[in-house]
Image (cartoon, helix red, strand yellow):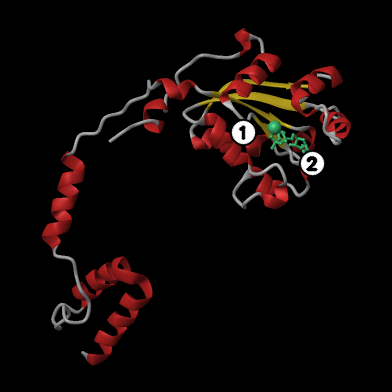
């Protein structure tokens, strides 16, 4: 009896209340002939049943047509991302997040197009090197749609300098230097629309409703 109580206390202390509940439940079955309740607090059965009943009986509503869900961002896998075989990984992250791929194209657009894409950086000292790097191989241009796609897309990419990017972000996980940071993401809704217009014809951008849309968007 004494030995069992201290074992149960150990389990409870190590695993916290939920662990204690599980440990308590298992132990109570096995040692039902002993006085168990004094050692481990056990949730009364009625409260769990009531909670389950509430969860199951509560109706839930699914909404998939809020206007903000049509926000689009331009994401590009740079030549180093392509060469390093990271195309699938980067696409996977956006897909699994719940964003909708509306346009995708692999291409090598040439220096003039890349200069235009990064026109706001033309005065920066690294601009010639940036254009040369971007022109060093094919890129994968994409448009992704979804609620908060621009801001969340930037969070998923990480900081411009991979050294400042948190683990779990694309740049934080897969690259090291600012000069080879494998991906681009629009920094505002306006620039996203401008960039999508620069890289895609209107007919390249697909309009469709993914089967999972109602399961990605929903309020309770
Ligand atoms: P991006 O446009 O490619 O998504 O990058 P970003 O917004 O995070 O950063 P931005 O300031 O727009 O810079 C564009 C790209 O230029 C290269 N860069 N090199 N000091 C440097 O050598 C330097 N600073 C920026 C990076 O490839 C950066 O992503
Ligand atoms: Mg930028």
Residue 108 in view here: no
Mark 1, mark 2: which one is toward the viewer? 2
Q: Among all residues in the image, which is located at the extreme front?
A: 123
Q: Give the x, y percent position of residue 78.
A: 75, 32
Residue found at x 38% / y 30%: 217
Q: Give the x, y percent position of residue 74.
A: 63, 25
Name the secondary structure under disc 1: helix
The residue carrying mark 2 has its beta carbon less than 8 Å from ligand 1: yes
Task: Measure the alpha-carbon separation of dots 1 and 2.
Answer: 18 Å
Q: Among all residues in the image, which is located at the extreme bottom?
A: 2
Residue found at x 63% / y 23%: 191
Neighbour class for label 1 at 10 Å: few (<14), some, many (≥20)? some
Residue found at x 61% / y 9%: 202
Residue found at x 31% / y 76%: 12
Image quarter of residue 66: top left
Name the secondary structure under disc 2: helix
Judge from the rendering whether residue 167 lies leftward or rightward of residue 216; answer left or right.
right
Image quarter of residue 135: top right
Q: Which residue is under mark 1?
A: 91
Q: Among all residues in the image, which is located at the extreme top?
A: 203
Is 28 rendered above or below residue 208? below
């Amino acid at each position: 009896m004494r030995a069992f109580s201290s074992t149960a206390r150990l389990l409870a202390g190590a695993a916290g209340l939920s662990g204690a509940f599980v440990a308590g439940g298992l132990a109570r079955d096995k040692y039902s002939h002993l006085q168990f309740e004094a050692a481990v607090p056990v949730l009364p059965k009625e409260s769990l049943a009531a909670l389950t009943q509430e969860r199951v009986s509560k109706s839930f509503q699914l909404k998939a047509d809020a206007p903000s869900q049509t926000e689009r961002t331009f994401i590009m896998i740079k030549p180093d991302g392509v060469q390093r075989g990271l195309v699938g990984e980067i696409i996977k992250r956006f897909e699994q997040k719940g964003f909708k791929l509306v346009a995708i194209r692999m291409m090598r657009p040439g220096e003039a197009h890349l200069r235009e894409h990064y026109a706001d950086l033309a005065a920066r000292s690294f601009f010639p090197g940036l254009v040369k790097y971007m022109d060093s191989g094919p890129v994968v241009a994409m448009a992704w749609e979804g609620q908060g796609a621009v801001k969340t897309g930037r969070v998923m990419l990480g900081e411009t300098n991979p050294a400042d990017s948190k683990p779990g972000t694309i740049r934080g996980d897969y690259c090291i230097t600012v000069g080879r940071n494998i991906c681009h993401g629009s920094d505002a809704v306006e620039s996203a629309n401008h960039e999508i217009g620069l890289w895609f014809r209107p007919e390249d951008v697909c309009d469709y409703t993914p089967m999972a849309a109602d399961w990605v968007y929903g309020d309770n």
